[in-house]
Amino acid sequence: MWITVNICLYLCFTCISAAFIPSSESCRLQGHFRLNGMYQDGDFVIGGLFEVQHLKVFPDLSFRMEPEQPQCEEFYMSSFQQAQTMVFAIDEINKNQNLLPNITLGYNLYDNCLKLVVAFRAATSLISGTEESLPSSHKCIGPPPVLAIVGDPGSTHSIAVSSVLGLFRVPMVSYYATCTCLSDREKYPSFFRTIPSDAFQVRAMMQILRHFGWTWVGVIYSDDDYGIYAAQSFHQEMQLHGGCVAFSEIMPYDNRRDIQRIVKVIEASTAKVVVAFSTDLLALMDELLLQNVTGLQWIASEAWTTSPVLHAPRYSPLVGGTLGIAIRRGEIQGLLEFLQRLRPDNDARNNLVRIFWENIFGCKFETGDSEGENRCTGEEDLSSIVNEYNDVSELRASYNVYKAVYALAHALHDLMQCEEGKGPFSENKCADINNLQPWQLVHYLQKVNFTTGFGDRVSFDENGDALAIYDVMNWQPSSDGSIIVRTVGVVDEGATTGKVLTLNEDELYWNSDSRKPPRSVCSESCPPGTRRARRKGLPVCCFDCLPCADGEISNTTDANECMVCPEDSWSNPEKNRCVPKEVEYLSYEEPLGISLTTASLLGTGFCALVMIIFVHHRNTPIVRANNSELSFLLLLSLKLCFLCVLLFIGRPQLWTCQLRHAVFGISFVLCVSSILVKTMVVIAVFKSSRPEGKSAMKWFGAAQQRGTVLVLTALQVIICAVWLSTASPAPHKNTQYIRSKIVYECAVGSVAGFAILLGYIGLLAAGSFLLAFLARNLPDNFNEAKFITFSMLIFCAVWITFVPAYVSSPGKYAVAVEIFAILASSFGLLVSIFAPKCYIIILHPERNTKKALMARQTENK
């Protein structure tokens, strides 16, 4: 079966390489390049792909008689440490009697030289068992096929290689490929990783941005799968959480003009925070320094958070205080000793160790062309060298390699523990250990769950992604001016406490004079009591804060709209809380109520005083003229008019609402009807003084006068009784006059009833005014008709003015207008009719005698 698979894999890799790799580059490498790696045999072999060197390809080989073999150069010690960590993990597992007992794991590792074509060649060799791509007629040599591959670290490499491995369900566990696209189980069904994807990385970065309230940020990203997919995820997360991207720029490759353009964009933007998804920012940073663009808060992705490239003192003013997320740091017991025990051998399959040895010690192993150079013995002491290879203080990528190997080992261990008849495959079968298929290992790898010696849990979700956990790093200046990276927190989406972001803010370094976090918002937050109004043509983060309208509130920061208060509530002055509406009515405690009450009591007192004066002088001619009984009845009715005002003041209640207009209507009818009868008596008296009218007074005796007043008053009583029985006035909370207040008033119930009541009073007043006006010039020593005419003129003027004033006055002021009309007309009647009489009675008593009246009558004649 594996022969067929090998042929298919060879063809697939050939097709894929044609799609991903330029043909010229592929041809140059074909037949002129040998893979560098490390190998150890075992019962089961695990493959590995690492970026240890950088491939140098000669641009033109056509003119060379003997083309030079392409070379890998720039040996990366940290990457070789990662490869050795895989070797260490396999060695540790082989010594562990509790994990894969009686099974020996082997390894076959290759250096991809940071080239996709080399990664394809290496994957082909690992899976098909041949180190080189040879014709199908050639006899396959090399190591046996591997069960799984640890790597590739690059997202682009992993996308290409895993797309082929997935066809045959060969598991691939990457320790550094973060592209979100690799979570697509339909395209990459056998891909796993021990590093969180960019989707988790972006969410972790969003936790930091949200923690400090940075909603207005710029984005710089590299023009590759890693940068493009990370930027897309970041845009989505920013939009989801209400943030905005001020600018989004692709980092160019060695194009100074584009870099200068990006610097101008950064300098012109109001965003103080810049998020960067890239592995190479050196050219941009140099240009920013050249243009003296500082004061920015950088947020670093895991690709460059721990990179030492920008740690030189000259970059400190620019990137000092940078916050970033890094792969979870781990500790691996015994790794340092293992790294220092490494020794080269003569096995060609372990040539990568010999290359490492030559680079770290600056020597050459004995070859035909190594004369005169420093010879390597293989016995050099690694413990005397201090560099990235033996630095185990910040194990991040290496720790992920360690977890990847152990994940495969645990999956294989679980596979071997299967009991016959209880297996997960068809007919409950278990995997055949002698004919193990990679897709069977995928099943167990999906369910793996264990805890490392450092205490981190390792498992995969349905997409093959690891648990999301990052360290939060802060770039801080050291004593020599360079930058050191310190761990200041952790982002753990699986935290049992529910707190995803944990920061030690006391240890944070901010690269500003204030030593405080910068503000990076397009618009400051809208406080409660306001709402956001988006600025036209700008992102949602750019807005103006508009105060809520009256009767509306917002009790949260950055409210998009204001809430309308319930009908019985109103907004407070700050517009951040609904408060019960103020209930408004004319009360006894307020100045207006006190003034009107005082006027009412004064009017009542004046009536009582006049009544006392009249009672005391009841036998004098002035009091007895024109029926003193009507005068006393008029004073009583005026007193009732003054007192009925008290029913209009105070909190409306059912009984006060029912009585106020009834008492007012009956009192005024009694008053006006008394005046009407007095006027009719004046006219009858003068008519009876003439021969032709001597019989007129018999129809206006005391009984007739009382009867007339009672009949006219009884009609008003009937009107009030019908009104109260059919549509009685009642207390009413009116919110239409003033929206911010509840006007507590007495609803009239029936407008028609109230109009009839006022109309009847007006009819009697008009009749009294007309009769008094006609009798004003009748000769007499004391003609009361003149004073009645003046009093009724005041009365009618007051009530004619009352109607429009009452209708146009809101709330309690309508009640005050009605009270004022009552008081004004009552005082007008009291003063006009009784003031002249009191003037004579008190100040000129000599004129209040029968002799004086007779003398005055003689003079008039």
Image (cartoon, rainbow, N blue to C red):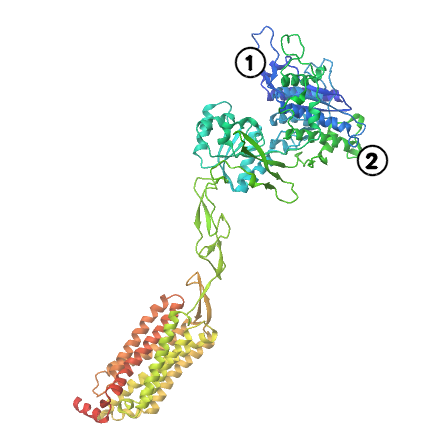
Mark 2 lies on residue: 421
Name the image quarter holding residue 436: top right
Return the x and y of residue 742 as percentages of the image width and height: 45, 64
What SS does tag 1 mark? loop
Task: Report the quarter where the C terminus lies.
Answer: bottom left
Circle 1: residue type:
Pro
Question: For residue 389, what is the image quadrant?
Answer: top right
Which quarter of the image is occupied by the N terminus? top right
**SS category of the residue bearing label 2:** loop
Q: Amino acid at mark 2?
A: Gly
Looking at the image, residue 350 sits to the left or right of residue 516; the answer is: right
Q: Which residue is mark 1?
A: 59
Q: Nearer the viewer, residue 428 or 175?
A: 175
Is 398 situated above or below 378? below
- What is the quadrant of residue 418 in the picture? top right
**CA–CA distance between discs 2 and 1?**
60 Å
Chain-order first, disc 2 or disc 1: 1
Residue 730 % position (x, y):
46, 72
Q: Residue at x 29, y 74 (%)?
A: 797
* Residue 464 seen: yes
